[in-house]
Amino acid sequence: MDQKYLYLSLTPEALIASMLPPEDFGKYLAVGSKKRTRGQALFFEVDTNIESDYFKTGIIKERCVPHSNGAPKRSVYLSIYRVLEHIPLSKLKNLYLVTDDGRVLGLEKGEYSVKNNSQLHLYQQLGPVSPRVATKLNPVEFVKFITDLSQPVSVPKIVFTELTLDELAENPLKGNDESLPYSNIDHLRDCLIGLTNKDSKKTKTVIRTLTGNLFYRMVKNGFFIGENGNVVYYPFPSLEELNSKYYPWWKSAVTIGF
Amino acid sequence: MLPSLFWLIPLGSVVALSFAFIFFKQMMKGEEGTERMIIIARHVRTGAMAYLKQQYKIVTVFFLLITILFSVLAYVLELQNPWVPFAFITGGFFSGLAGFIGMKTATYASARTANAAKHSLNAGLQIAFRSGAVMGLVVVGLGLLDISVWFVVLNYFYPSFEGDGHNLMIITTTMLTFGMGASAQALFARVGGGIFTKAADVGGDLVGKVEAGIPEDDPRNPATIADNVGDNVGDVAGMGADLYESYCGSILSTAALGSAAFMYSREIQFNSVIAPMLLAVVGILLSIIGIYTVKTRENAGQKELLAALNRGVTLSSVLIVIASIGILLLLDMPNPFGLWGSVITGLITGIVIGKATEYYTSSSYSPTINIARSSKTGPATVIISGLATGMMSTAIPVLAVATGIIMSFLFASGFSFVNISEGLYGIGIAAVGMLSTLGITLATDAYGPIADNAGGNAEMSGLGVEVRNRTDALDSLGNTTAATGKGFAIGSAALTALALLASYIEELKIGLLRLGQTSIVFSNGSEIKIAEATLTDFMNYFEVNLINPKVLVGVFIGAMMSFIFCGLTMNAVGRAAGKMVDEVRRQFREIPGIMEGKEEPDYAKCVEISTRGAQMEMILPSALAILIPIFMGLLFGVPGTIGLLVGGLSSGFVLAIFMSNSGGAWDNAKKYVEEGNLGGKGSASHKATVIGDTVGDPFKDTSGPSLNILIKLMSMVAIVMSGLTVAFSVF
């Protein structure tokens, strides 16, 4: 039976039909069919029963078929523009994180509870735009803030992950930043100090766009996708779980090629 | 008829080899683990043996050529002792055999260590450490066996207690020449092994980690097995052959110095010759006791693991201090407490060098942390601070050796700078003291690559997190002991080379006698019989002084040799690594299933590439190390040769410390960042320290350790070729 899958890629934003299951599709995205390339990838599996006037889903049946030699079709691009906003949250299945050598980790949906509201946060946005922002808002508040379409700076839907700030989350002025791998660390500190000094300022852009790889090891709690008041949360495994259950992926994730 | 005390020496050898055999059998009783673990271990074992086979082929050709040369010198030109060709071959054979057994053991032990770590940390430690002890005990056992056999054979032809005392000098100086065989074999093992290991490591990392983005020790990387093989050929076979040579060289040069210093009494002369050998025998017994005390509790931390190893080494060292005075008194040596002071001086010097190495290369101390911190401003500052740290790190070892030389000299000479012969004997005894417990100190060294390979095996076999944590802990401990071991190897090489330098003069004496000369005539017309001439007389006769341009030229060329040798070996790593990069790229390109883990890479091809690269690249530096002392002797005679040895020893010793410590510090600075400091893996700091580590790799694992051999081998060549030098020098 030729099973078909639908994926929402974030690297870059695209809706792709494929005959490859998530593990194989992740590998394919990362290292290509001839293994001569490599690159990190993030994607959601999407329910194939999606009803949309925006996407031409009819071509899936027509084009997502095995090659003449029987090999499965790896990818049929359905759309590469404003994809995220047109996929309902309810149609999203697991989120897959792929390392640049093709190791795939699947994350399931979970419950998110706000823990400490006084902390500062650092969010790496993954779609539809990819700046890195420092903010006083917790993830749920941030989704509400950034998807408020009445505001000039807003997006209809947002995917992002929270990155660790360590001591800077509590004490941007004097907190130790030695264990943070981010570039322009002094600028990050300035942004955080600016947020604490100015009550009215809710977010500050630290980096305008993501360049290079996302540091998986710096993910603080998980990945968020949301619009208006709705937030779907994909919790990231604990260090213990990464070391025991997902070791091959984790080892690959902390290996950065130069 | 040899005195009964002598027979303790072959007995000590038998004890060492017996315990090595017992430890080997105990290790072999252990299970290798899962099928995957067995396959990986077999790959490494096959690769290691393929490497050795190839290396021994080339070494055999080299040995045949040199043996022919020595035979011509001995039997046609009659410039050399007729036993030299045979002594040369046995020295090389036993050194090679020690490396072979050590590597065989190590490659059998790695999977068993990983498997034992499934049960407990202590079980893993026991297998790894006792397998390392096989190497330690085989080196000392074979060393003493070679010495004993030659002593018995030569004593048959030149009875020790007959004649005017020259027989014992002939015996000891003849035996000294088997050190050249050991030295030459050690050079090939160290240089070839060093090039192999870094070619595989750097080449594998560049494509695997950097280009393909797959982690270290990942079975998908075709160079992974070659990397593991490299740990064995460099750090087990190379280090073993190096220290075998130091061990035998220090004992034999001290014996030669003793036979010259105490010619006034046949009995004292004989006892001074066997004193270093008996110290070595007692060292073997105490090493075995120490080995049995190395154990730890489950869930032990890094400090406890280190303490477990230190307990064994410290106990052996303390006991040798107590036992050595007993030996000296038993032998009725003149000035026994002075000589005891020399033994203790040697031991303390070794400990100080080891601790200084640990201080400059461990990430627990400020020098390495400061290198890591300099990564905040990029790779250039990492390189600068690493070079600076390496340079600064030469101070303590050099001062320790300088103090050791002076103190051991003064202790043995009765605090008189005039009594040169006995003072030099004291320096030799200090070197023997430092190396007396080599059985256990080498065990801590050889343990490192075994633990490292065990970690690699656990990783590639996908063992559980608890097992990997245990093998990581054992591996991490191995990194510390390896760094300390390198410092110890350099320190002992320096003292041994100095003792060999002094022995060179004794060899010249024999060389002149062989030419039929019975006295030496000075420029002022005065004449002294060779049999009565002191070391100072010989230095005056050969005009070895600092205003003689031949000496100065020799010093300059000796200093240059160290740098040329390093340059050649470092370039060799670059070229051999380049070939490995091409091969790994080819495999990724032509075997598409590798990345998915569906197809196995061609590991053997990578081993072959690295082996061929190492063998080709080791020829030029090795040939230079042998040919330059010969040419210098033929061109500028004895003064030029002594200058060459002094220049080579002083620059080589300092350069070796600098390179080993810089490389070690860069390596640990990177590990410090990888532990999560300064941004951790993937950060800009990490990138900068990775560059430092890559630069440091050939520093610490190829060029630095190879310099130990260079300084000893040049002395050995000078000694063996002394007959040629006195007969044919142009100027």
Image: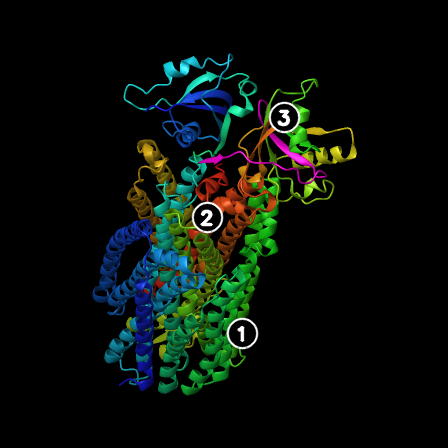
Q: Which three-letter amino acid code belongs to the residue tagged 2?
A: Asp
Q: Quadrant of residue A230?
A: top right
Report crowding for label 1: few under 14, some 14 to 19, many 20 or more residues within 10 A (C-alpha). Answer: many
Looking at the rendered structure, whether the residues under marks 3 and 1 are on a common chain is answered as: no
Tag 3, which chain? A
Residue on which disc 2 sits: B697
| Residue B508 percent across, percent down from the top left | 36, 70
Between disc 3 and disc 1, the foreground one is: 3
Q: Position of residue A225 (x, y in %)?
A: 58, 28
Chain identity of mark 1: B
The answer to whether residue B549 is visible is no
Kind of residue indicated by mark 1: Met
Q: Toward which corner of the image does residue B161 lie, by quadrant?
A: bottom left
At label 3, the amino acid type is Arg
Q: Which residue in the rendered view is the most extreme toward the left?
A: B76
Residue at numbered disc 3? A208
The residues tagged by marks 1 and 2 sit, at their Cα atoms, a distance apart of 35 Å
Query: Range of the magenta residues?
Result: A104-129
Q: Mark 2, chain letter?
A: B
Above or below, B325 relative to A190: below
Task: Please report whichever mark, 1 or 2, sits nearer to the chain's N-terminal start.
Answer: 1
Mark 2, secondary structure of its residue: helix
Q: Which residue is mark 1?
A: B407
Would residue A195 be visible to someone looking at this image? Answer: yes
Residue A256 screen position, x and y as percent: 50, 38
Task: Tell me what residue is drawn at x 75 percent, y 29 percent.
Answer: A201
Q: CA distance from mark 3 to mark 1?
A: 67 Å
A43 versus B391 height, above or below:
above
